[in-house]
């Protein structure tokens, strides 16, 4: 097949990967903005390389005309979670989305592959709009924890190195490592709520500080320089206390100061 034709085929998949990655990243941001814990830690997307497509076609005896029908992971999204429990939450989010339709699900977490591979796979339908009109295409979504991702990445590199013929002693090591990953994920699950609390607290503090800085920025336009300098010094003093309640109180004071200036400017307009 001509290279140009490959480009034409893969173009909509590129768009799909960009759109879906952006949507999940936005979901992460929405959680953070609201001070909520997000079950998604990170999102990665890729369009399968032409050489990987050719390899897979050869392995599965797929003719190039049938590539789009038979290869479901031309577009791939990987969602990385912190905890195993988060994976079910992400699956539920995807099942409930109006812009994605689930075609197939494979649970390699409850049914680990003989290699030791663990991950939750979903094949979804997703529609993109291009110059040639709408196109409904298939995408593979892999959902796994950071620990599962570490294992899969290392194992994938070894498969590449040994051309899918990993020596027996290394395969045994990988199976041992897979068991260790299960233990690690279980251990982390037992402290999940502690970690989540800490992260939410950290995110809330970051949101309040962003709010305070925004307020100070706005006061620059209305307050005099001496007052701004005083407010800034006070901010650094309160920040050093490392106490979220003090930061909240300070932010409320800034709101009141800003409100005072607003009232003043309205009165002077009258
Ligand atoms: P790459 O290079 O990652 O793209 P099927 O649906 O059964 O006809 P398929 O597509 O092989 O065939 O399905 P499967 O088994 O669900 O695997 C899909 C993808 O999951 C693979 O894509 C890998 O990315 C990943 N995967 C599956 N098994 C393993 C494994 O044992 N180790 C690692 N590291 N990853 C695995 P590709 O195209 O095979 O590879």
Image: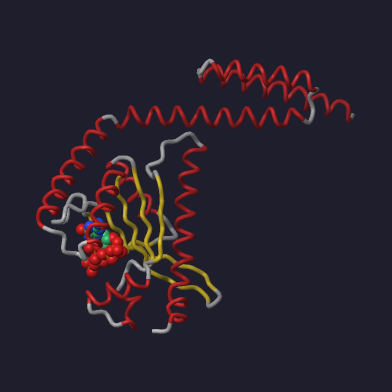
Image quarter (top left, top right, bottom left or bottom right) of the N terminus: bottom left
Occupied quadrant, residue 54? bottom left
Occupied quadrant, residue 36? top left
Q: Residue at x 30, y 59 (%)?
A: 122
Asked if 251 appears above or below 72 in the picture, the reply is: above
Frontmost residue, 133 versus 195? 195
* Count of residue discs: 0
Residue 37: in sight, yes or no?
yes
Q: Residue at x 48, y 38 (%)?
A: 32
Relative to residue 6, is residue 120 drawn left or right?
left
Occupied quadrant, residue 185? top left
Q: Residue at x 72, y 21 (%)?
A: 257
Image quarter (top left, top right, bottom left or bottom right) of the C terminus: top right
Relative to residue 223, is residue 105 drawn left or right?
left
Q: How is the image coloured?
A: secondary structure
Asked if 217 appears above or below 13 in the picture, the reply is: above
Q: Position of residue 221 (x, y in %)?
A: 78, 31
Residue 105: in sight, yes or no?
no
Frontmost residue, 12 versus 93? 12
Q: Position of residue 27 (x, y in %)?
A: 47, 47
Q: Position of residue 80 (x, y in %)?
A: 35, 48
Relative to residue 173, is residue 155 drawn left or right?
right
Q: Residue at x 79, y 28 (%)?
A: 222
Q: Position of residue 259 (x, y in %)?
A: 73, 25
Which quadrant of the frame does ligand 1 lie within? bottom left
């Amino acid at each position: 097949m001509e290279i140009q034709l490959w480009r034409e085929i893969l173009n909509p998949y590129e768009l799909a990967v960009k759109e879906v990655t952006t949507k999940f990243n936005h979901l992460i941001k929405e959680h953070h903005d609201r001070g909520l814990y997000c079950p998604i830690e990170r999102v990665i997307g890729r369009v399968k390389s032409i050489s990987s497509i050719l390899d897979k076609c050869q392995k599965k005896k797929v003719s190039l005309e049938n590539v789009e029908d038979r290869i479901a992971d031309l577009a791939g999204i990987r969602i990385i979670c912190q905890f195993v429990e988060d994976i079910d939450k992400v699956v539920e989010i995807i099942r409930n989305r109006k812009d994605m339709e689930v075609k197939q699900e494979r649970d390699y977490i409850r049914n680990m592959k003989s290699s030791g591979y663990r991950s939750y796979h979903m094949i979804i339908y997703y529609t993109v709009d291009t110059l040639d009109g709408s196109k409904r295409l298939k995408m593979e979504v892999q959902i796994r924890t950071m620990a599962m991702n570490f294992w899969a990445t290392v194992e994938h590199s070894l498969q590449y190195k040994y051309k899918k013929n990993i020596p027996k002693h290394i395969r045994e090591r990988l199976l041992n490592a897979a068991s260790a990953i299960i233990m690690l994920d279980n251990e982390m699950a037992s402290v999940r709520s502690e970690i989540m609390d800490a992260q939410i607290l950290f995110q809330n503090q970051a949101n309040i500080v962003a709010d305070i800085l925004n307020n100070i920025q706005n006061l620059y336009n209305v307050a005099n320089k001496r007052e701004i300098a005083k407010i800034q010094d006070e901010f650094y003093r309160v920040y050093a206390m490392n106490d979220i309640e003090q930061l909240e109180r300070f932010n409320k004071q800034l709101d009141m100061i800003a409100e005072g200036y607003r009232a003043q400017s309205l009165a002077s307009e009258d």
